[in-house]
Image (cartoon, coloured by chain):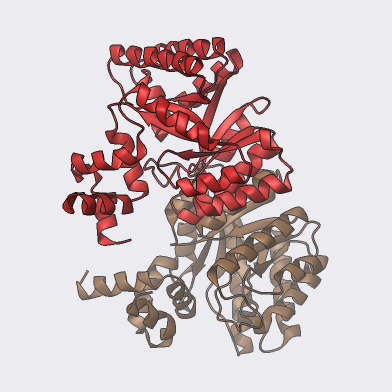
Chain colours: A brown, B red
Amino acid sequence: MSLFAWLVVKGLPLVPKPIVGRVAKRYVAGETLDAALATIRDLNREGAMATLDLLGEEVTQREKAEACTAEYERMLVAIAESGVDSNVSIKLTSLGLEIDEAFCRANVDRILATAKRLGNFVRIDMEDATTTDATLGIYRDLFAAHGNVGAVLQAYMRRTLADIAALPAAGANVRLCKGIYIEQRTIAFRDHETVRLNFLLALEKLLANGVYVGIATHDEHLVCGALGLLDRLRVPRERYEFQMLLGVDPELRRILLAGGHRLRVYVPYGVDWYPYSTRRLRENPEVAKHVIRAMLGGR
Amino acid sequence: MSLFAWLVVKGLPLVPKPIVGRVAKRYVAGETLDAALATIRDLNREGAMATLDLLGEEVTQREKAEACTAEYERMLVAIAESGVDSNVSIKLTSLGLEIDEAFCRANVDRILATAKRLGNFVRIDMEDATTTDATLGIYRDLFAAHGNVGAVLQAYMRRTLADIAALPAAGANVRLCKGIYIEQRTIAFRDHETVRLNFLLALEKLLANGVYVGIATHDEHLVCGALGLLDRLRVPRERYEFQMLLGVDPELRRILLAGGHRLRVYVPYGVDWYPYSTRRLRENPEVAKHVIRAMLGGR
């Protein structure tokens, strides 16, 4: 890792906001729902599906969580009216999880009911480890009640194989990703190769259990391993999808689409782009280097 | 990668021919069939089998392709008369693939008929990705007609698992290698670890399908993974062989032979050693360093 990359990773809160803002342009569809719908239309034309995410997390005021709930209902209506191919992804901390769990659950319930009425699906994103138990608990109850909701499991968490065993399998839809939060060694694998290994172990277990899996990765090695598992277990095309983030490796996205695989792009929008973009920056510090160069060069 | 290694990889056409010539001495048995047969006799004494290859590729004149065909028939006769343990490996572009596919097919047909009469076997080497479809098409047809012919699949190609599913399995003999040509990302995996992963996925699929596999690698990691698969799937010794190139890691060759595995060495000969040797050089730029040192040192 270069000194610069190290600084970005270790000193992220010190990266000036204008730089993160330039980074955000790559990973965020814009500040408005209209901008996000335009991005989704482009992705649909490419053959990709989308999942729409309103940026914002760790909300501590009830009104903000209620506004977020209302915005998600507005998003679901806009998706239905515009006819784009997209579901939505929600973060429980933006819907009041840190205020009051019952309040959060009621907000999610409203969103799920609206989605169900419109024939759509809601993914509950996974956040840092302090929220895992509550998130999976809410998911489990609402999946039993509504059905049109999915969870996310992170390959870096040591608990993931056990979570797969404990969660429902029949009719379930789980996104599997590596995980991007900074977690303690006691609960998470840290070594890159080990997280890859656990990703493939978890994927095999999910597929063997008949779960529909959103294989969320930009890591070619995991794409290769996933294709091998799908082939060996003879998983039909309609039983899985690949998932990638907006702005990350569009060439790999096109390769997978050309291979006939279902693929969904995570499309975030909104004014609250800072924490999301810093996580993307941590994942790929090289991007910051390009941004700084572009700013210094006046482009 | 050292600066020198980088120069060799990126600037291969610039490496002076005398240097490549010194490299060739390591990887090529000589310029004549007699020299090649002498090399094969040495290998047979060690317990290794051989596959004999006449250097030359991308032939654009019919007479050259016809001369190559005739030389392969002469090789098969010489193998039978000398009693050495060797089959032959052919490259379709040296037999006219780029001139006219039907002409090429007729040449291969002649070689296969001669080999059959002499109880021998012909491997169709795989070349760069522009030739894959034609090569597998010719292989499939001639395998159905003659039987005594095998194909090669490359682990770096994204299509390989699908090719295994589409090609015949019963009675088939496939060499699996990593692949050495420079291919686009859209069709080939590039990351070293990913190619290794796909090699093991492809090997498992071939073995599970009952294909006789030529496990062509000098990568200890893949040798270890292959031995694990052979053990787990209880593949008997006569259902596979390891394959290695002349001049590459003779110690590993002796290790595998001492372990009781069948092993075949690829023995190229002929005056047309330049393209073959530059590919070997790209694979192992360290060799060039030794050669240059030896030349400067007057040895």
Query: Is B221 placed above or below B24 here?
Result: below
Q: Residue visible at 25% across and 70% down?
A: A294
Left of A109 or right of it: where is A12? Answer: left
Q: Residue visible at 19% across and 40% down?
A: B18
Q: Position of residue A119 (x, y in %)?
A: 70, 56
Residue closest to the eye, B7 or B116:
B116
Query: Is B211 placed above or below B99 here?
Result: below
Residue closest to the eye, B185 or B108:
B108
Residue A117 seen:
yes
Q: Residue visible at 67% across and 68% down?
A: A153
Instruction: Give the quarter of the image for residue A23.
Output: bottom left
Left of B97 or right of it: where is A104? Answer: right
Q: Residue visible at 65% across and 83% down?
A: A186
Q: Where is residue A187 in the image (x, y as percent from the top left)?
A: 66, 80
Q: In which quarter of the image is the N terminus of chain B?
A: bottom left
Q: Position of residue B189 (x, y in %)?
A: 46, 48
Circle count: 0
Residue B285 seen:
no
Residue closest to the eye, A4 or B219:
B219
Q: Where is residue A280 in the image (x, y as percent from the top left)?
A: 46, 72
Instruction: Give the quarter of the image for residue A59.
Output: bottom right
